[in-house]
């Protein structure tokens, strides 16, 4: 029997919502912790303190998730902001969705 998988594309920002990072993962809580704890200290997210999840989408297919990540990365800043605001107008950290 095939095992079900869940994949997430996510958008992170910093406390002032000035910089964005878009990624894909199969474990959003674990990935959040890696960003928050600066597991990779020389990377973009560590350099700019980008560790607040403001948007995510869920996929059952890894290829679909990767394609969506690539699509979002091509978008202009304004379009990304508009997308985030469809679900999170105040740019709150959505990690609590995963801590329940």
Image (spheres, grey):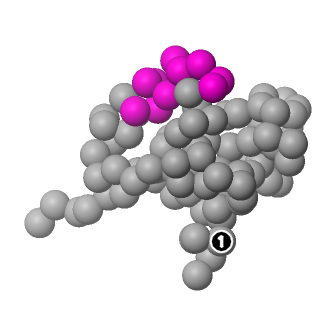
Q: Quadrant of the C terminus?
A: bottom right
The residue wearing badge 1 is 96
Tell me the residue at 65%/64% (across/down). Answer: 95
Residue 17 placement (x, y as % from top left)? 79, 40
Residue 76 falls left or right of residue 46: left
Query: How many other residues sit within 10 Å of disc 1, few (<14), some (14-19) or many (≥20)?
Result: few
Q: Residue furthest bottom?
A: 100
Q: Quadrant of the N terminus?
A: bottom left
> Relative to 98, is 52 above or below?
above
Q: Residue furthest left?
A: 1
> Relative to 74, is 21 above or below?
below
Tell me the residue at 32%/58% (across/down). Answer: 5
Question: Which quadrant of the figure has residue 65?
Answer: top left
Tell me the residue at 63%/26% (across/down). Answer: 78
43 or 60, which is in the foreground? 60
Tell me the residue at 74%/42% (across/down). Answer: 13
Residue 3 falls left or right of residue 27: left
Check residue 74 for magenta coloring.
yes
Residue 97 placement (x, y as % from top left)? 58, 70
Boundaries of the magenta span: 68-78
> Relative to 1, is 12 above or below?
above
Residue 68 placement (x, y as % from top left)? 40, 33
Query: What secondary structure prevails in the magenta region?
Result: helix
Secondary structure of the residue carrying numbered label 1 = helix
């Amino acid at each position: 029997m095939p095992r079900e998988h869940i994949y997430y594309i996510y958008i992170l920002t910093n406390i002032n919502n000035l910089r964005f990072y878009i990624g894909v993962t199969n474990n959003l809580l674990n990935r959040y912790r890696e960003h928050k704890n600066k597991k990779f200290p020389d990377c973009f997210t560590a350099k700019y303190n980008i560790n607040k999840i403001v948007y995510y989408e869920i996929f059952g297919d890894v290829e679909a998730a990767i394609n969506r990540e690539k699509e979002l990365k091509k978008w202009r800043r304004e379009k990304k902001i508009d997308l985030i605001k469809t679900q999170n107008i105040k740019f709150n950290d959505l990690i609590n969705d995963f801590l329940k």
